[in-house]
Image (cartoon, rainbow, N blue to C red):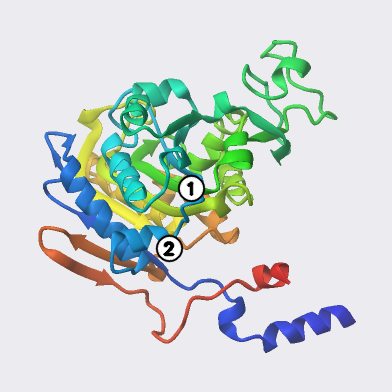
Amino acid sequence: MVLFSVFVGLFFSLPTSSWAKDLFSKVVVVESSDAMQSFVPNPEKIREMVDVGIKEVTGKETVLNGILSLISTNDIVGIKVYTLHSETGGTRPEVVRAVVDVLKEAGLPLDHIILWDRSMDTLRSSGFLKLSKELKVGIAASTVEGFDKDVSYNSFFPSSLVAGDVEFDNKNNFNITTIAPVDSDVGRRSFLTKLLTERITKIIMITPLLHHNLLGTTGHIYSLASGSTDNFLRFEMDGDRLAEAVSEIYAMEEVGDRVVLCITDALLCQYRGQNNGFLHYSKPLNELRFSFDPVALDWMSLKTMLDIQNSVDGVNQSLSVFSPSGKTLCENAILLELGNGNESKLQVQRIDIGKGVGSIKEPALPKDITKKKSWWKFWKSR
């Protein structure tokens, strides 16, 4: 009780700005009607959009100063993409090319840049293997790189291990139908890729505005979590289980703490189809969205997906009906202090590069409140 009283006294004696949660998140939406023509991205226009987005989200005078405020030339920067077995639907190579060009111009050595995702097959199918050779940068797949047996995400849910999982060969005798005994830890751990534990020091996320059957949208949190661990299929069968797992994996120090910038590739919104690229289920938005807050971007993506599906279907369903698991994911992420998902806490700046600065939606908060740190992170840092 004495220790608790001392803690409470210290807690309330601290300046508010040193312990409270960041009260708003900045999102920069850059749009151009010329970004795509007949579903084909315009590389020059996209580079212009990337320059504007990085400059505005960092608040720097130039794009190079902006990117160097996030990384150093000694960092190994992993550009995390989300790929499908086609060049449509996933992260578009033209957006990645623009970001790589910015990194190169900022002085980052080519061998310090790695394009990566979970599977080398989808990286190849999506055009990133070709892009990496053209740009002379690295490319890696977490399943090929291998997983670190000393770093894992543990959960109660066991699974049927499959080929490629760390514990499959020795513990499962290649029998994918065998489920580990209840009293065993086998199948309850998802090991982290060696890309994050041994190589990459900073992550730039470029995630498409793509439908997901359970979560509503394939967002930054899902993209990074699903690409970073083995034994992940056990979460894909249940929406609430998936929402819990991906937010907790993202919250790991070796994962989310390395993310320095999130970019939502909203050139197209594919509102149906999940892991299959369907242009007839896609709507051009011609936008790139930039933020340091993955929850804010995922929340905006979820709302965009809901609005488009309601418009296409001619209904007015709520978010809770459209994707309860997607809503749960954002709520879990907020509880884990990964970011803000409340529209009243988002500062959204829209820029049409053909027209200049557009509307700026300010958060409904007092103007004199500065960015703040949560009390438990302050306590942990001590």
- Does the residue at mark 2 contact the one at mark 1 (Cβ under 8 Å)? no
Q: Is residue 375 depicted above or below 251 in this figure? A: below
Q: Is residue 23 left or right of residue 248?
A: left
Q: Mark 1: give few (<14), some (14-19) or many (20+) Cα within 10 Å.
A: many
Q: Position of residue 43 (x, y in %)?
A: 19, 41
Read off the residue under disc 1.
203
Q: Position of residue 218 (x, y in %)?
A: 42, 40
Q: Quadrant of residue 83?
A: top left
Q: Is residue 46 depicted above or below 1 in this figure? A: above
* Amino acid type indicated by mark 2: Ser
Q: Position of residue 336 (x, y in %)?
A: 60, 58
Instruction: Say which of marks 2 and 1 sits in front.
Output: 2
Q: Is residue 104 visible?
A: yes
Callout 1: helix, strand or loop?
strand
Q: Which label was assigned to residue 69?
A: 2
Q: CA distance from mark 2 to mark 1?
A: 14 Å
Please tell me which residue is depicted at 38% across the width and 51% down the height of the picture: 107
* Amino acid type indicated by mark 1: Ile
Quadrant where the C terminus is found in the figure: bottom right
Q: Mark 2: give few (<14), some (14-19) or many (20+) Cα within 10 Å.
A: few
Quadrant where the N terminus is found in the figure: bottom right
Q: Is residue 154 visible?
A: no
Q: Is residue 240 left or right of residue 131?
A: right
Q: Is residue 312 depicted above or below 330 in this figure? A: above
Q: Quadrant of residue 113?
A: top left
- Earlier in the chain: of badge 2 and badge 1, it is 2
Please tell me which residue is depicted at 73% across the width and 23% down the height of the picture: 167
Q: Is residue 294 depicted above or below 147 in this figure? A: below
Please tell me which residue is depicted at 21% across the width and 69% down the height of the picture: 359
